[in-house]
Amino acid sequence: MTKTKKNPIGSMVVYLILICWSLTTIYPIIWVVQNSFKAKDKILANSFALPFGELFTMANYRKAFNNLNILNSYKNSIFISMTVALLVVLLAGMGAYALSRYKFKGSELLNSLVIAGMMFPAFATIIPVFSMEFSWGIANTGSWFLTMLSVILPQTAGNLSFAMVVLMGYIKGLPVELEEAAYMEGCNAYQIYFKVVLPLTKPSFATVAIFSFLWSYNDLFTQSFFMRRPDMYGITMLLNQLTAKEGTNYGLTASAVTLVVVPVIIVYCFLQKYIIKGMIAGAVKG
Amino acid sequence: MGANIYRNKKPAFLFLFPAFLFMAVYLYYPFFKNFINSFMEIKQLGSSGSGFNTPWYHNYQEMVRDESVWVSVKNTLLMMLVTLIGQVGIAIVLALMVDNVRRGKQFFKTVFFFPIVISATALGLLFNLLFLYDKGMVNQILEALGRETLIDWKAEGTALFTMMLPVMWQYVGFYFVILITGLNSISDELYESAKIDGATTLQKVRYISLPLLHNVICTCSVLAVTGALKVFDLPWTMFPKGMPLKSTFLTGTYMYYHTMETKNVDYASALAVMIVILGIILSKAVNMIFREKDY
């Protein structure tokens, strides 16, 4: 963009402010990472020194892996979030396709139901969902698989309507001629969907999948209802319980936060284009 | 016309059935059930209740009398104000600045946005460490700057500030990205002709950027207000159970408190109904305020 000649002092002030805000987002993370390598009392004495020489210790990480069993929570969280993302893409994709292409009695109503679905906050559905799953024998059991399932199902439902809105916006913009051509060749509706529409909708599916994954991975509210045993905790539940149990072990807290945050940041650096798109598209979601 | 393909409606049913079954069971039914639950008596999470309350609107009566409800609503409204002014306000300033710099646009976008992808629970723990009384990062900085006494960031007077600051901070980048996308769609020609007319950068911002951003700012405001009602993870991690002295409850955390801690499940359902109603009223209000100024 061509702009007026820069006033050098003005643009220095602008850069200074922008860099200051960047520091507020970057520095806390660096701070917590460097302190995760220090013993608890050393953090309190001087938290700004880099953890070299005598300061350095891996004790916090040993504790995080052995006592907290953080890897197990990772496994649980990733299993849940991947399943949620997969189910959302699968179900919302089919639903969005049918709603964008078929016009029938009641399709308007279904459309408004989808929009309405985005407005329901999790607060307003969670108690009945819990009793329902409890009466089916899914919630609050000792089985690992059922516990995971009891989290997966409500999280999937919570992301469906948003995903359908995003996908419908995209599918409606696809040229219908391609589908007609496939129809002429003798494809039926299912083949048209899986062989023509699905491949074309890939970018939008990526957006939806990434958003659903991240949302499910970061969500504490649903996890806290259905995960009652430490070996079934997801990553956010583990962190939440850490405050209650080891609230004063700051070194351990720092290492746990590091272990949760750093992989996400790495993934974010590689996929940021899709992630930013997905998060913005998901803004309307309840 | 190729509408022939879609004349046979049978496949549509099969395509739609799984998604809508899911939503019916996990969204629509629970939503209405929750409304009914708010009139029942339920003493345990998972039980279906022992009948209706006497009188049936007992929970709503109770809500009016419950001081913590007022505290939580007050805090939530304050939270909205903070998100509106803090998040959207700071985001506007940052977006206008980044739009006017030559280098580093992509860098700032990446850095400003990343707190959003981190779980609010992890951020809650992180900010717990930063705001430790003896001695987190903030108190260490203050000490280095010559302050003699430590500030207890979790005491009654400062707790609300300590809770809302991270929530605000986390989402600034979100609105920043929406606004910068809006700024990018403003045609360069407008700026060019303003330049020929001798406009300064500030004048261009005032008379071109801001007016043309109006609708984007509206969207952000609605999102900020409804977003404030959904805040849960971070406050509950930093200040569980409304500590100190139940003064930091938000509507969401207060509803959770009654579900999990006091086991007053029917009351929690009524609180959830209140959250829904609050959400509808407030987003309608924000919509109305901004729509009237529409171009």
Image (cartoon, grey):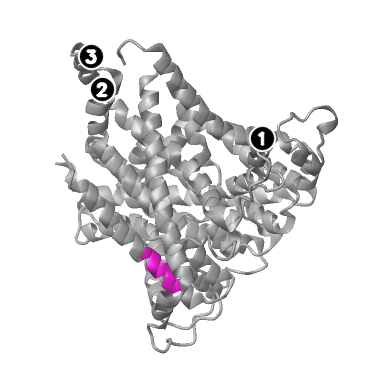
Q: Secondary structure at mark 2?
A: helix
Q: Which mark is residue B195?
A: 3
Alpha-carbon span between mark 1 and mark 3 = 48 Å
Q: Is residue A63 visible?
A: yes
Say whether marks 3 and 2 touch (CB < 8 Å): yes
Q: Nearest to the eye among marks 1 and 3: give it.
A: 1
Q: Which residue is tagged 1? A: B146
Q: Is residue A171 visible?
A: no
In the rendered image, the residue lying farthest to the right is A54
Q: Which residue is tagged 2? A: B204
Q: On screen, B59 above or below A21?
A: below
Q: Secondary structure at mark 3?
A: helix
User: Percent position (x, y) of residue A214?
Assistant: 51, 45
Q: Is residue B80 left or right of residue A135?
A: left
Among numbered discs 3 and 2, the one appearing first in the sequence: 3
Q: Secondary structure at mark 1?
A: loop
User: Percent position (x, y) of residue B71?
Assistant: 46, 65
Among numbered discs 2 and 1, the one appearing first in the sequence: 1
Magenta residues, start to end: B269-276
